[in-house]
Amino acid sequence: MRAIKSMLGAAAGIAILTACGGNYNSLITSTTLVDVQDNSALQFRVGTALFPDGTTGLNTVVTFRYTTGASAATINTPTITGPAGFVVPSNAQTATNTDAGTNKISGTPTGGTTLTTFGTAGGAFAYGFENINTSFGTGGFAEFVGTVADNTALYQDGDSTIVVGSGKGKVQTVIGPKILGAAKLGAIGNAYTMPLYAPEQSRLPFILGPPAVADFHNANFSSAFLGYDSGFTAFAAAPVAGSYSLTVSVPSTAQQNSASFTEAATLTSTAPLGAESTAVVVTSTGNGGATFTAATAPAGVTNQLVYIVDISATTATPTMYTCAVPVVGGVCTYSATSGPTASGATTGSAPFATGDSIYAYVVGSDYDIVAPSSPSNLLESPTLANPVDITISKATEVTYPATGVTGPLQRRRR
């Protein structure tokens, strides 16, 4: 919680985005030292996450915002403390992580060397936990517990346990960091692939694109900007009913005063939502458009999003799209002009091209994932549901243009 505001005139000018670029991508521009403690608010929620492999983990949602609705601080260190019985798993992903075997999901203060879940790069920002402490507003890629290849899960589709479809294994699989301005792609900047603690073969990126959010595929945004944070961070750690506490420590810098915030959230039930059906991709006649279908949502789901990732066959770079569909099932249609708009153009380009790898996967939830998203929602404390449960389908991959139905779809009774 925060104290009564005492510096309403302080201007932060901060905005956090999932990746580099965008007209919201600015650092603190005010010459006034920002009083984070008295002019910011922290919110925290927990829930369950049902993963594509059928296991259940912990889901979290966080907002940490200044009065303007932008991120409260450019650098901070979060720590989540779970109830008795909650344990961070010890596996290949956390073998050297000091959180393993404890009930804490920690970060490491700037300058520290302890290997933790969030490390020195991970922090709590406007909507979600992100890897941008060391690269606020730049194109740095995520470094989960110190490894540079941890956000490459989508591109290891050849041995993925959760990617299915006729295009599986047909994209670039070289592992390495994303290099801005170059064709090589092996990481998605700043955004965690999830669930954390799971091997990369079981992880996916969750970056919001149009039409679920305002289209940013235009000249006003850097071509390196991939999309907005979905706000949730899911962990492959068995959820335990009880109280979870999030502490966020803000260090003193040239732009911000030191501060400390703590918020509690209670998980009353560890029962997950039902399993989501895999999305179906049905392409058009090859003119660059495509349709994506989600089945009737399982019991308990009140919102469904289809996440779509197009990997260019020529540049290997990703373009993100996200579409909301009714819980009774529905179709998302992308026309031949709904892709990125080039500088000076009046209409968009074709979103998909011959040879592209297209991924589609569905996230069901018992809350509205998009409504609190930043920067479309600039409330200091946007309304957050409680609990925040999600269920994630497997990912269908096809090589464009595919013909007919190219993924499994089973209708489910509600």
Image (cartoon, grey):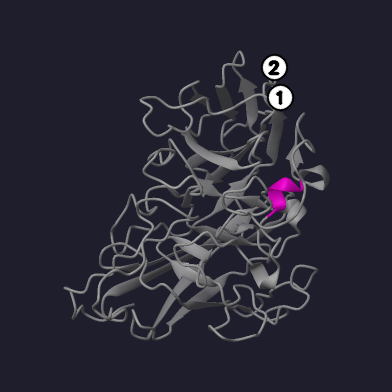
Image mark for residue 255: none
> Taking 148 as reference, is 35 left or right?
left
Which residue lies at the image location 60% right of the left edge and 31% below the top edge?
Answer: 413
User: Magenta includes 155?
Assistant: yes
Which residue lies at the image location 69% right of the left edge and 74% below the top edge?
Answer: 88
Quadrant in the rendering for residue 86: bottom right
Give the residue pinned by disc 2: 403
Give yes or no for contact between labels 2 and 1 (Cβ–Cβ under 8 Å): yes
Q: How far apart are marks 2 and 1 (CA)?
A: 7 Å
Picture coordinates of residue 370, whole percent (x, y): 42, 47
Q: Please name the amino acid that badge 2 sits on.
A: Thr
Give the residue pinned by disc 1: 406
Q: What element carries label 1?
A: loop
Q: Nearer the viewer, residue 393 or 343?
A: 343
Magenta stretch in the rendered image: 152-156
Q: Please name the amino acid that badge 1 sits on.
A: Thr
Picture coordinates of residue 162, whole percent (x, y): 74, 45
